[in-house]
Image (cartoon, rainbow, N blue to C red):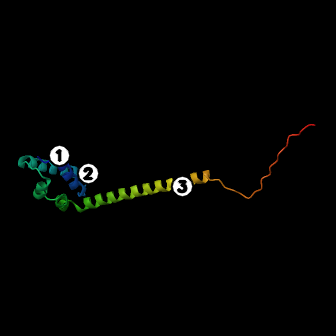
């Protein structure tokens, strides 16, 4: 059985996860790698993803090769953007958690019955019986 498109997509995706560059550069790099891998797999009738790893290297190795050629400023910028996104998501999740906890406590307090030691006066009237 010839190597599936899904296996190649996973391989290319793994390379992309290890690339730190602009979106435009990443898209171009991944398109080039995908074309090379597809061409190689079709020409050699590759049946196992390990043959791709053996010929091209691991996704990490490919990413390192491209990173070595990339400008350091682009790498730093991509890492900073990623850190900023992670921090923003963490802050939003923390705010949602706090809001949820406050809503639960408020709901509990609104539904709780409180007892006091105030005496209650009960007035009853008895019906009069006539003779």
Which residue lies under the disc numbered 2?
23
Between the C-alphas of marks 1 and 3, the distance is 49 Å
Q: Are marks 1 and 3 in contact (CB under 8 Å)?
A: no
Give residue 20's position: percent from left, percent from top.
Answer: 25, 58
Q: Earlier in the sequence, mark 1 or mark 3?
A: 1
The quadrant where residue 71 appears = bottom left
Q: Nearer the viewer, residue 83 or 102?
A: 102
Q: Residue at x 91, y 37 (%)?
A: 130
Image coords of residue 5 (percent x, y): 17, 46
User: Who's the residue at 28% across and 58% down the image?
Assistant: 78
Depth check: 22 or 124 in front? 124
Neighbor class of circle 2 (other Cα within 10 Å; few <14, some 14-19, many 20+) is: few
Q: Nearer the viewer, mark 3 or mark 2?
A: 3
Above or below, 69 relative to 36: below
Label 3 Cα neighbours within 10 Å, binned few <14 / some 14-19 / many ≥20? few
* Comes first in the chain, label 2 or label 1: 1
The x, y position of residue 9, in whole percent, is 20, 49
Q: Is residue 36 left or right of residue 127?
A: left
Q: CA distance from mark 3 to mark 2?
A: 40 Å
Q: Quadrant of the C terminus?
A: top right
Q: Secondary structure at mark 3?
A: helix
Q: In the visual, does 87 lie left or right of 98?
A: left
Q: Which residue is mark 3?
A: 102
In the displayed structure image, the side of residue 13 where residue 49 appears, left or right = left
Residue that numbered label 1 is attached to: 5
Towards the viewer: 82 or 17: 17
Q: Nearer the viewer, mark 2 or mark 1?
A: 1
Q: Secondary structure at mark 1?
A: helix
């Amino acid at each position: 059985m010839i190597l599936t498109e899904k296996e190649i997509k996973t391989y290319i995706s793994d390379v992309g996860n290890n690339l730190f560059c602009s979106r435009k550069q990443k898209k171009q790099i991944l398109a080039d790698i995908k074309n090379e891998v597809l061409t190689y797999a079709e020409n050699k009738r590759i049946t196992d993803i390990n043959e791709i790893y053996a010929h091209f290297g691991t996704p990490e190795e490919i990413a390192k090769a491209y990173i070595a050629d990339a400008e350091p400023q682009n790498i730093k910028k991509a890492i900073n953007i990623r850190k900023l996104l992670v921090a923003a998501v963490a802050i939003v999740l923390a705010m949602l958690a706090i809001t949820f906890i406050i809503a639960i406590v408020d709901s509990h307090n609104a539904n709780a019955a409180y007892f006091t030691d105030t005496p209650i006066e009960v007035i009853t009237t008895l019906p009069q019986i006539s003779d």
